Image (cartoon, rainbow, N blue to C red):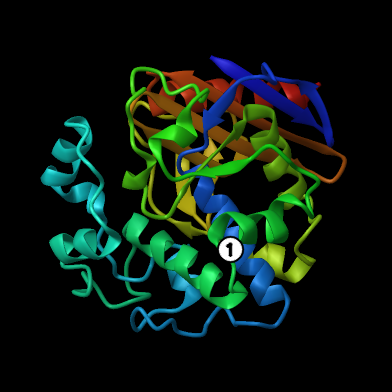
Amino acid sequence: MLVALVSNGSLLTPAQPEVTVPWWSFTKTVLSAAALSLVRDGLFDLDDTLPEGPFTLRQLLRHEAGLADYGELAEYHAAVAGNETPWSADEMLRRLDATRLRYTPGDGWRYSNVGYLYVANFIERLTGLALEEALTRLVFSPLGLSGVRLATTPADLEGVRMGAAQSYDPGWVYHGLLVGPLDQAAVCLDRLLAGQTLPPALLREMQSVRTLGGPITGRPWVAPGYALGLMQGAVEGGLVLSGHTGGGPGSVIAVYRCGEDDNTASCAVFAEGGAEGAVEAQAVSHLMSAVIQ
């Protein structure tokens, strides 16, 4: 496993800086940060509805919009495994019957990558920019980060550590797949949750969590929840984490922050072929050591 650890704002354990990894669903945290930056700038309100359906930006960011997820389609997984050309977004939405809401927005919870496709579209629509440029302007440049990019074609994954999925096509990730150094994932989350781009009130909104139940078998979560682009809740050992786990063919990444005031830590862990629970447990172990020191 590769590990990057930030303690009280300082990078203590840099992962191999020359290694670029897929950020998988940690991309959702970055998309949420970008969307909230547009809210900060007065261009939209969290509780305004979007043109894609009768749901709000807040509901999209917290997976409360009533949307299904293309991950439930058996033909999706078969096509990815068969190295087929990705479907267009419209074709994916048609196959999923995505316009049919599975519950009334706000009344339930269901993890949905489709919701974050709509968030990515929202960011492009309001900024008038391609997604990569918008994320750079709204998130990465303000946080002092470089070297993170959006992978859209197989050629964009050259030099990226993909484990057994060297022929993967990132077009299968419909909200976009960020790739970058593991160190920068840890620093990105640390600076974001330290309030370096969002004002305190909006940062509190980002961390307003919907608790989802009790322990998850094989994973360290005791009381998991989901906030706005953040997996958040208590884990074994008594820590409360905010961040995101992501996985795809060949690898898993877990990026989390914990602590308060002058005793904070952020950790990013990446493993080829690893299980989510094992990678999260490594992140918890490193964070526990950092905040107890």
**Picture coordinates of residue 190, whole percent (x, y):** 73, 42
Among the 4 quarters of the image, the one containing residue 262: top right
Up-down relation of residue 120 to residue 182 (above or below): below
Q: Residue at x 75, y 24 (%)?
A: 290
Name the one closer to the observer, 152 or 2. Answer: 152
Left or right: residue 215 versus residue 77 is right
Residue 4 seen from this side: yes
Residue at numbered disc 1: 208
**Picture coordinates of residue 140, whole percent (x, y):** 71, 50
Among the 4 quarters of the image, the one containing residue 269: top right
Q: Residue furthest right?
A: 262
**Picture coordinates of residue 61, whole percent (x, y):** 48, 64
Residue 241 seen from this side: no
Up-down relation of residue 264 to residue 227 (above or below): above
Q: Residue at x 40, y 61 (%)?
A: 117
**Badge 1: how crowded within 10 Å, few (<14), some, or many (20+)?**
some
**Picture coordinates of residue 245, whole percent (x, y):** 48, 38
Q: Amino acid at mark 1?
A: Ser
Name the one closer to the observer, 281 or 127. Answer: 127
Left or right: residue 282 versus residue 273 is right
* Quarter of the picture holding the C terminus: top right
